[in-house]
Image (cartoon, rainbow, N blue to C red):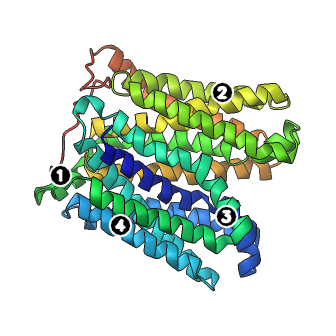
């Protein structure tokens, strides 16, 4: 991968750390602002909502801007929002800060994917977003624990400042190392909006949201499953999350490498594997050894499907930033719906393993949604540049 794409991946790491770090510093925020733990938890939902709704709107505003200038402006906005959160004295100010950072992060990701696609030949358009998603996954392994550790020793505000500093350094690296990508022609705006008349694009968004929702339905309730069902001590919980996180990094490296040549088969088998692993986990959760295997397997095949799903979005539509920002919004719809549905199942006294069954059902729905394209791909010879979805190859909107 070009160094510029690695730089963008580091920026994604800092932006995604902000999204998930609340989980690690939640008690400190609750004590600081005198609000309930559940109220602080809404900061995660607010962030996801900002990405779902506001990110595409901001991307539309930036469609005619030079890509590099847009990236730098979004990173500057993110740093400002993160700094606002670090100095917040009222809870509502922190909410505003979360919205600002979410808007910037969502639009940044969409434009960064578009830039990464511009920097590689068509045959490597599956690996390029894998590098960006690698930053997202490393945030789960390193960003969240680091934010919690900083909070424990220096306070939650230091965690906010640390992420702001990292984002500022990322902006400097983008300025120095990411080449200038010209703004698209004025017709690019119409072309981007016209892409949303494509039913295959919406099908890709829908299946992506379902499968990510399935994974998050399970992941959000790992801790009580580990301790109350599997019987692990609380001290083992961070290590189990670490096992899941390491699995995502390994899986991301493998799937990103082969996404270009085996796009649709990887989606079909991947969605099926997610469903099977979640069902198996629900059935064997009381066994510690089996739980370890299930967690590692879900890490290897779950979130690492993200770059493959992103490559399919580009394949059935185009490489423009609005399409990719909307793709990130679809993923965040899954991030919201999966844990919500899992919580409803627990509240209905269906047991702590019920979120795993919710995830299984969502993964099966995603598999059924992608199955027609998988079957069509088997009837159509594929090349690396065309992937394997029996769809037309990606077309670029603007430079």
Q: Residue at x 75, y 30 (%)?
A: 292
Nearer the observer, 190 or 243: 243
What SS does tag 1 mark? helix
Q: Residue furthest bottom?
A: 89
Mark found first going from the N terminus, 3 or 2 = 3
> Disc 3 or disc 2, which is closer to the eye?
3
**Left or right, residue 147 beside residue 134:** right
Nearer the observer, 270 or 151: 151
Instruction: Say which mark, if any, is on residue 277.
Output: 2
Instruction: Say which mark, if any, is on residue 191.
Output: 1
What SS does tag 4 mark? helix
How many marks on residues?
4
Instruction: Say which mark, if any, is on residue 74.
Output: 4
> Badge 1, how many Cα within 10 Å: few under 14, some, many 20+?
some
Instruction: Say which mark, if any, is on residue 150.
Output: 3
Q: Disc 1 vs disc 3: Cβ atoms closer than 8 Å?
A: no
Mark found first going from the N terminus, 2 or 4 = 4
């Amino acid at each position: 991968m070009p160094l510029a794409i690695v730089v963008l991946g580091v920026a994604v790491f800092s932006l995604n750390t902000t999204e998930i770090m609340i989980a690690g510093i939640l008690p400190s925020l609750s004590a600081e602002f005198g609000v309930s733990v559940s109220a602080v938890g809404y900061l995660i939902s607010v962030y996801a909502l900002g990405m779902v709704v506001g990110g595409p709107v901001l991307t539309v505003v930036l469609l005619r801007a030079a890509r590099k200038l847009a990236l730098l402006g979004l990173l500057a906005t993110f740093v400002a929002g993160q700094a606002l959160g670090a100095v917040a004295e009222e809870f509502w100010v922190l909410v505003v800060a979360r919205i600002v950072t979410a808007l910037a992060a969502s639009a940044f990701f969409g434009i960064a994917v578009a830039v990464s696609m511009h920097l590689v030949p068509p045959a490597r358009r599956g690996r390029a977003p894998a590098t960006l998603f690698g930053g997202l996954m490393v945030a789960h392994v390193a960003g969240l624990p680091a934010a919690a550790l900083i909070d424990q020793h220096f306070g939650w505000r230091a965690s906010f400042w640390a992420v702001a500093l990292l984002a500022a350094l990322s902006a400097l690296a983008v300025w120095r190392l990411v080449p200038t990508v010209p703004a698209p022609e004025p017709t690019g705006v119409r072309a981007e909006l016209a892409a949303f008349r494509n039913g295959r694009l919406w099908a890709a968004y829908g299946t992506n949201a379902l499968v990510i929702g399935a994974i998050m339905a399970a992941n959000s309730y790992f801790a009580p499953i580990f301790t109350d069902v599997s019987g692990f001590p609380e001290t083992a919980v961070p290590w189990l999350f670490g096992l899941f996180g390491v699995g995502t990094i390994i899986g991301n490296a493998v799937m990103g490498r082969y996404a270009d040549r085996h796009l649709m088969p990887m989606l079909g088998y991947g969605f099926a594997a997610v469903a099977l692993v979640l069902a198996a986990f629900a059935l064997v959760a009381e066994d510690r050894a089996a739980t370890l295997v299930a967690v590692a397997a879900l890490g290897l095949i779950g979130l690492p499907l993200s770059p493959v799903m992103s490559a399919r979005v580009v394949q059935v539509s185009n490489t423009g930033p609005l399409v990719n920002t909307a793709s990130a919004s679809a993923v965040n719809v899954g991030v919201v719906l999966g844990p919500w549905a899992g919580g409803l199942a627990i509240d209905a006294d269906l047991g702590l393993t019920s979120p795993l069954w919710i995830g299984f059902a969502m993964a099966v729905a995603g598999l059924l949604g992608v199955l027609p394209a998988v079957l069509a791909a088997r009837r159509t010879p594929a090349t690396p540049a065309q992937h394997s979805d029996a769809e037309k190859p990606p077309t670029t909107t603007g430079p």
